[in-house]
Image (spheres, rainbow, N blue to C red):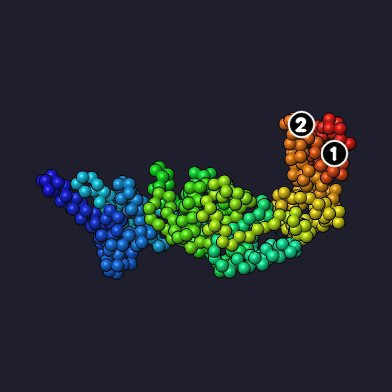
């Protein structure tokens, strides 16, 4: 060692001694963040009786909030921070240790104050924020519990009875589930019910809609972010949906929209129950039951190469199909009655009933948006109608306008030019709206989203009998 280096080294040693003397705890780790030394004051603070209990262990396994690994990774000190340990808070300082060539060979951490009296104003602000965070987290945790059980699945059709039976059987296993069904058929309701009937019922139910999150954020949303993964951003770790659902159930809604690169990572979690948070190379283990749901034709996506075949088979262990509402018309009556009851109890207004014609109208519709659309229609009708009974005439204006006719000119007149096809679709939509409103122009115009005078013009142009 050169003379200047030996002077530097002895200066460092004495500085280190002073620091250790004035602080209330000190610890040092090697380049892999394993504890190589801890002083007796820090052991007392942490309640460690023998240093052999902790030497050689990953510091995070002893002090979960430690950021010494982050200091090693970045090579930069964190001069002042508040670190939580159990229910206490310490003011800490962390420094990287370099060798003579400047390479990081470890890090050292000091507890500057364990009694935060010295920093009272700052700490009271911090604690207030911490309290707010805790109450926000408690609300989130409550939201993470399933609200529905199998008893909440309304319907009296054979299909719904079979579905409930299947849900009970599926709840007894812990293999992945794949729920298929059109939009609004009740896939999430079914997923919650399966969770509520399973042994995991006390653990979280977490739902994530894959289609609603931009591709670039999906990985972080799923697997979380390790501290310091993004430069300049919040250096604290954030939990992903897998970690939040640990011990419970994770619903991956609209799984068909998952990008291929993430599909590979999901497959690994399904096979090994482990993953790496973004920006970390430590593996996290979880125990999560996966329920995937989609309104897409997943088999077709496998054929065209946009969905991994191996993932499809891994998810398709317990498949369950929720039938569309038009295939179980027997459910329309109990569902409508149930929705009218919930609408009345929420609004505090008198319960409305549906008469025979009203029910017949609801049962004659194809409901492309399924149960959700039926519920929305009844909500709108209740809001706009003052009488205690909902008739066909009062419901009709609030029925969804749809181009989904079995004899749609889009499919039948394929040889027509585009303007002729558009005109044909328009004619069809107008006559259908008039049919549904019993020939009444104002509700038909509302349903079509045009003014009454525009509707009169179009009736004339298309030579419809208005
Ligand atoms: N059988 C049912 N009994 C009671 N409510 C139902 C039933 N089916 C669906 N619903 C209600 O209809 C609405 C839509 O259901 P849900 O969100 O579960 O459908 P989904 O298939 O997951 O829809 P999407 O494909 O759009 O995600 C919810 O308010 C749900 O509570």
- The location of residue 172, given as percent across then percent down, is 58, 69
Q: Residue 156's image quarter?
A: bottom right
The count of marks equals 2
User: Is the CB of the residue bearing disc 2 within 8 angstroms of ligand 1?
Assistant: no
Q: Nearer the viewer, residue 376 or 3?
A: 376
Q: Nearer the viewer, residue 166 or 420?
A: 420
Image height of 87 relative to 99, above or below: below
As drawn, the residue found furthest toward the right would be 465
What residue is drawn where x is 85% and y is 43%? 435
What residue is drawn where x is 40% and y is 47%? 229
Disc sitting over residue 420 in the figure: 2
> Marks 1 and 2, Cα distance to the nearest angstrom?
24 Å
Disc sitting over residue 441 in the figure: 1
Q: Nearer the viewer, residue 331 or 410?
A: 410
Image height of 234 relative to 338, above or below: above
What residue is drawn where x is 86% and y is 32%? 463
Q: Residue 312's image quarter?
A: bottom right
Which secondary structure, mark 1?
A: helix
Image quadrant, ligand 1: bottom right
- The location of residue 404, given as percent across then percent down, is 74, 44
Q: Earlier in the sequence, mark 1 or mark 2?
A: 2
What residue is drawn where x is 38% and y is 53%? 281
């Amino acid at each position: 060692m050169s003379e200047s280096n030996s002077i530097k080294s002895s200066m460092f040693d004495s500085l280190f001694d002073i620091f250790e003397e004035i602080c209330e705890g000190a610890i040092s780790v090697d380049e892999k963040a394993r504890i190589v030394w801890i002083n007796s004051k820090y052991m007392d603070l942490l309640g460690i009786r023998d240093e052999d209990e902790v030497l050689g262990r990953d510091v995070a396994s002893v002090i979960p909030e430690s950021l010494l690994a982050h200091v090693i990774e970045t090579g930069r000190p964190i001069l002042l921070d508040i670190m939580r340990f159990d229910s206490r808070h310490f003011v800490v300082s962390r420094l990287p240790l370099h060798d003579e060539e400047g390479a990081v060979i470890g890090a050292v951490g000091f507890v500057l104050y364990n009694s935060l009296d010295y920093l009272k104003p700052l700490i009271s602000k911090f604690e207030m924020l911490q309290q707010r965070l805790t109450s926000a987290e408690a609300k989130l945790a409550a939201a993470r519990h399933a609200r529905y059980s199998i008893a909440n699945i309304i319907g009296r059709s054979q299909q719904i009875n079979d579905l409930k039976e299947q849900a009970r059987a599926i709840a007894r296993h812990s293999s992945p589930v794949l729920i298929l069904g059109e939009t609004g058929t009740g896939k999430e309701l079914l997923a919650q019910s399966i969770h509520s009937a399973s042994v995991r019922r006390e653990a979280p139910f977490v739902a994530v809609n894959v289609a609603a999150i931009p591709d670039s954020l999906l990985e972080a949303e799923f697997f979380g972010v390790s501290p310091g993964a993004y430069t300049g951003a919040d250096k604290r770790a954030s939990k992903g949906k897998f970690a939040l659902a640990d011990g419970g159930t994770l619903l991956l809604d609209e799984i068909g929209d998952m990008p291929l690169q993430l599909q590979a990572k999901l497959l690994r979690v399904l096979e090994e129950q482990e993953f790496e948070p973004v920006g970390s190379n430590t593996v996290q283990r979880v125990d999560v039951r996966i329920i995937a749901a989609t309104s897409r034709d997943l088999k077709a996506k496998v054929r065209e190469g946009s969905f991994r075949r191996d993932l499809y088979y891994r998810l398709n262990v317990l498949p369950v199909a929720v039938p569309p509402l038009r295939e179980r018309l027997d459910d329309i009556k109990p569902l409508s009655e149930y929705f009218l009851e919930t609408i009345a109890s929420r609004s505090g207004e008198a319960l409305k009933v549906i008469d025979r014609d009203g029910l017949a109208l609801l049962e004659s519709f194809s409901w492309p948006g399924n149960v959700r659309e039926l519920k929305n229609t009844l909500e709108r009708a209740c809001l706009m109608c003052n009488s205690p009974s909902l008739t066909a005439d009062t419901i009709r204006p609030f029925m969804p306008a749809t181009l989904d006719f079995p004899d749609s000119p889009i499919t039948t007149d394929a040889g027509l030019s585009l303007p002729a096809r558009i005109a044909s679709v328009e004619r069809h939509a107008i006559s259908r709206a008039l049919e549904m409103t019993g020939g009444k122009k104002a509700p038909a115009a509302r349903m079509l989203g045009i003014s009454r005078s525009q509707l009169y013009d179009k009736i004339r142009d298309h030579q419809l009998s208005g």
